[in-house]
Image: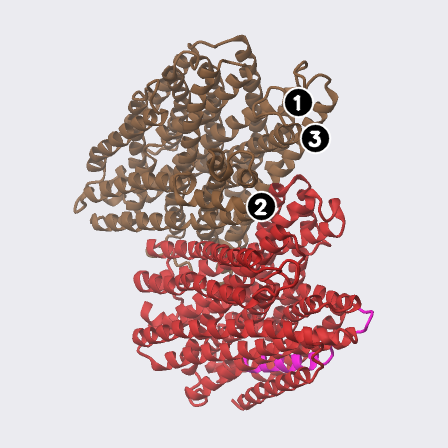
Chain colours: A brown, B red
Amino acid sequence: MELFPFVVVVGFLALLAAAYMTISVLREDTGTKEMQEIASAIKEGAMAFLNRQYSTIAGLAIIVAVVLGFLTRQYHTGIAFITGAAFSALSGYIGMYVAVSSNLRVAAGARHSLNKALVVAFRGGAVTGLAVTALSVLGVALLFYAFGGLLHPDKAPLEIVGFGFGASFVALFAQLGGGIYTKAADVGADLVGKVEAGIPEDDPRNPAVIADLVGDNVGDCAGRGADLFESTAAENIGAMILGISLVPVFGAKGIIFPLVARAVGILASIVGMFFVRGREEGDPMSALNRGYFVTTILAIAGLYPVTRYMLSGPGVNFLYFYGAAVIGILLSYIFVFLTQYYTSYDYRPVREIARASITGPATNIIAGLAVGFESTALPVIFISMAILGAYWLGVQSGLPGGGLYGTAVATMGMLSTAAYILAMDTYGPITDNAGGIVEMSGAPPEVRRRTDRLDASGNTTKALTKGYAIGSAALATFLLFSAYIDEVKLLLNIKGDFPVDIGKPEVFVGAFIGAMMVFLFSSAAIRAVGRAAQYVILEVRRQFKEIPGLMEGKARPQYGNCVDIVTRGALKEMVLPGMVVVVTPILVGLILKAEAAAAFLMIGTITGVIVALFLNNGGGAWDNAKKFIELGNYGGKGSEAHKAGVVGDTVGDPCKDTAGPSLHVLVKLISTITLVLARLFV
Amino acid sequence: MELFPFVVVVGFLALLAAAYMTISVLREDTGTKEMQEIASAIKEGAMAFLNRQYSTIAGLAIIVAVVLGFLTRQYHTGIAFITGAAFSALSGYIGMYVAVSSNLRVAAGARHSLNKALVVAFRGGAVTGLAVTALSVLGVALLFYAFGGLLHPDKAPLEIVGFGFGASFVALFAQLGGGIYTKAADVGADLVGKVEAGIPEDDPRNPAVIADLVGDNVGDCAGRGADLFESTAAENIGAMILGISLVPVFGAKGIIFPLVARAVGILASIVGMFFVRGREEGDPMSALNRGYFVTTILAIAGLYPVTRYMLSGPGVNFLYFYGAAVIGILLSYIFVFLTQYYTSYDYRPVREIARASITGPATNIIAGLAVGFESTALPVIFISMAILGAYWLGVQSGLPGGGLYGTAVATMGMLSTAAYILAMDTYGPITDNAGGIVEMSGAPPEVRRRTDRLDASGNTTKALTKGYAIGSAALATFLLFSAYIDEVKLLLNIKGDFPVDIGKPEVFVGAFIGAMMVFLFSSAAIRAVGRAAQYVILEVRRQFKEIPGLMEGKARPQYGNCVDIVTRGALKEMVLPGMVVVVTPILVGLILKAEAAAAFLMIGTITGVIVALFLNNGGGAWDNAKKFIELGNYGGKGSEAHKAGVVGDTVGDPCKDTAGPSLHVLVKLISTITLVLARLFV
């Protein structure tokens, strides 16, 4: 317990660091008047979307909180749910505000030097990384304290579960709504602007161009932030629940270990962030990688004393748990590499798609499907090895029932660098926006070249984060699933195994529905993009037709209208698929009961992870196959192969930016729902 | 036991009926010399492929049989495996021989009347239907007798399991090899012939045209035949295993009930087949539907006395089991309808894809993905209801542990019309081939109109059979999965539940790998088509270039070379994905043991069914979206929408004709492998 204050102190320290980063970003030069105009339009649009989105989510959340309170008759769960939702929203708000303030300063900084722009962009991203992880750990700690965790630590974790549910509830809608927004705006802007009117990307004459830039923020920044907020929160809570059964050996230390490990990771990330510094002629990625390397080393070093102090006990060797933590950190590296292998044009899979493009769009799509399907295999094999390895280490530690805790420690290890990773992720949309601002404000070409280089590295970091997010979700599936089983055992007062008899028809049916829901949700998410894009297309066409002098550059398009229309479209389209995910597990649990809910959960999470891998990697591979062709291969830009590549890229967009990332959240949401409502299912 | 001879008699009766149909087909007019030339080229190619394919499979099967004998040390299992493989191959051989003899006679018959052609085509197909179902039931009965089933009926079923494994082994390679063949030839013929050289489909100048026609036979006829041979065999055996535990109540009657139910279905189908008779101006589908209706009514009627006689006992009301059988028959109708809903252009899903084609291939593909994903939901819901309903009826019957047997009876009900369904299926490639022969031989237009109408109905029956096949596979998953659990219980001498603890890491990992294997296999199957098609493309291009006068119609292309090249390509490409499916469950069972194998099986089958639904329905919907545009919608043939529709159709081809149908078999193969090797996993 004596480390509890350490967790709180680190949380506030991280918020202080975030405040410092914010101030240092806001003090930067804000560039020319043209730049400011564009940036303020983006900022206005992004904040307007976030406000409206949060209002919609708040409405839904209140309904859920009331139903939850009514169903469980536990006001703690309701409070925790609202707190989780509110903290997630707050961290999203802070991160987004700073991101849309940074883009302008990055654009302005790019007029001076690459390093200037890079540091501003990374610090802008760091605010998201720090706000998300700090508020996540502080929220859990706060509730743990409020629910009397210091007095009876073995009771509180089960009452905090609502926090994870609230966080995943917000995350689902944030990722889904943001994902729909970004792709609807993108597709709408491209189809009418590039294809029909024949004007280049980011051209100020395109009425949807601001909406497109807003979309980068609300999808990659706010959406992924909420996703990782939820990961860290849900996995902390899941691991804390598993820690309950270790009280006889470790006392409360096993319960608060996840929080302490997280705090160590945050400290490591803060230090790592100050190592990011680029050189004018260097590759921006190597600057980012240096910081990541420092963070990783510090996390590995820092976890040693923590596991040693907290996970030692009579007959228990902490070194095995330390080994499990290292497995988690290694797995994050492996996932980052596997994502690169399947989505970068330096390797076989993307080149296979590019080559297939020579014979047209059909063979491009077929090759992409094959690559996407294939790309699920290695990640599953490595996750399996990590789960088995960490479990084995946990068993070897000598701790009774320590196997499960070994996998929990591995998850903590994997998530220890989350703050840094998230900073790199948000760096992506900031540099992307900066490039747009530079382009639209007519800045000189050397400035554009600098932002182009930053943008390229931002694309890489965005892709890597997606790999990291799905990897941590995959590792967490087993943890959360086990926490559910543990909770059911506690509720039913079962000492031995909880027998999920998978030969019962309702269990089989629960499993069937779990897998099916993943496909149904993906369908709804993909279709929502198409529908929302239709609204944009109609509006852009209308403006091209009705505003005189627009194409000649004499009149300004009504950017606000497009932003407004995508906002309304995305929010409208996110509700139905989102509610399906919330309602289905509840129905399965209430009608088919706890065993069926366990099978639902197991297959839902497994299928969700695999389909997400398929959608993310397939989409990323299509994207880069097009870029590979644009580099001059197979005829280059304008060739038949390139046209086919563009088709593949467009198909991949809703897969990799809407459905895939939303599935990460879905996986964790169904876990937290079943955890919260477990008592109703028994 | 006294009904055992009835089963054998019906089996031989069905073979007699098949012989009668064969003779009546072979006696028909064989048309003009041109027709005969083309038909003999098709026949030669198809039989050559079948011979080579069976040699390859035989080689693999012998290896597996030896390994199997070595692993299990039970020569009965090895004998059963070889018998199952041989019977499946034999039925495929008979069916294929008659099919490629019928196409010519249908073409010739079409010169006289629609009815003549229709009856010949259907009878040609009926031979496959009868041969497959009769040999399947006779094979199981023969082994049951040979392994002493009449003396100790509770031992024999477990020893026959190898028969199902042999059948599914052949089915996997038959469906996979046939599926690769048919699509590689199709894509190759189209890409070079239609797109590059600009000649119409089925044009005799195209060197791949015969290979394309051969492909229709080896994919739809031989492949689907082996698939359903395997379904009926495996599900018979699975239900017989479940019957073992009912010996205290029913004696041996519960064990041989599946065979008797199958025999009744065969009788019903034979009668139904004689009701198929078309009118010159009528729709061929209504003639086929009449026969299907008669078959269904007779099956429903015939199952009443059988359940009454065989499934009555002290305190057991047979009516509940009869109800379960009716649920199975209803489910087959529902699946046929759902397949139509998602793949026919009379309904919303296909029209959605067609409309999305206006904005190009990318939106066509996105809409198709959304439809394919969505199309998994309703089938899963209906399967779930059928499983729960049949189980509930089984419990209500008063039979202790009767719930599982209720689902087994439902499966028997669903498969009772298999012979008729399969006749309709094989009717598809026969009419398709007849159309090709008429076209290539330059027959007069009214003949072509007749075969066109038959061909259209054949496309419908092929699609419906795919729905039926996946529906029965889905229903069977639970049956086979339960049979595995039952066998493990018998082996471990467990009286109560077999506790599959899904909280164990190795169980979770087994499940993860089960789902992943489905995706990996789909990737390999889709990629194999692309690779085999490349061989064809190169050969067709070569012939166009090197044979003087070919394009002017003065020289004949070397059809045989193309046939030969596709054959070698398809056989080469089928081995690796096939062996992955055989080896993975064995490794999971040996390394991670019986509980993990159960989870592997459960998730592998569930994911397999769902991904197959996605691939089949998505592919079918893309196909018909193109056809809907060709009817003159959204600009009709040659419009931008049509070009997009062609892309979607091409993408759908390997999905719906190679990967999807192979997954049906995969689902059952992993069941029979785990059943056979269960004793090694405990």
Residue identified by numbered label 2: A523
Query: Are dots 2 and 1 on a single chain?
Result: yes
Provide the residue span drawn in magenta.
B258-282
Q: Who comes first in sequence, dot 3 or dot 1?
A: 3
- Amino acid type indicated by mark 1: Asn
Q: Is residue B134 left or right of residue B114?
A: left
Tell me the element at label 3.
Answer: helix
Q: Position of residue B450 (x, y in %)?
A: 76, 68
Q: Chain of mark 2?
A: A
Of labels 3 and 1, the one closer to you: 3
- Amino acid type indicated by mark 2: Ser
Q: Residue at x 62, y 43 (%)?
A: B361
Q: In this rendering, does residue A491 appear at all?
A: yes
Task: Give the distance between the C-alpha atoms of the residues marked 2 and 3, in whole angstroms.
Answer: 23 Å
Residue B563 vertical position relative to residue A373 in the rendered view, above or below? below
Residue B444 vertical position relative to residue A8 in the rendered view, above or below? below
Q: Position of residue B682 (x, y in %)?
A: 32, 68
Tell me the element at label 2.
Answer: helix
Q: Chain of mark 1?
A: A
Q: Nearer the viewer, residue A351 or A226?
A: A351
- Amino acid type indicated by mark 3: Leu
Residue identified by numbered label 3: A538
Say which quadrant the N terminus of chain A sits in: top left
Q: Main secondary structure of the magenta part?
A: helix
Determine if the magenta segment contains residue A94: no
The disc placed on residue A561 is 1
Of labels 2 and 3, the one closer to you: 3
Label 3 crowd (10 A; few <14 / some 14-19 / many >=20): few
Q: Residue at x 58, y 31 (%)?
A: A186
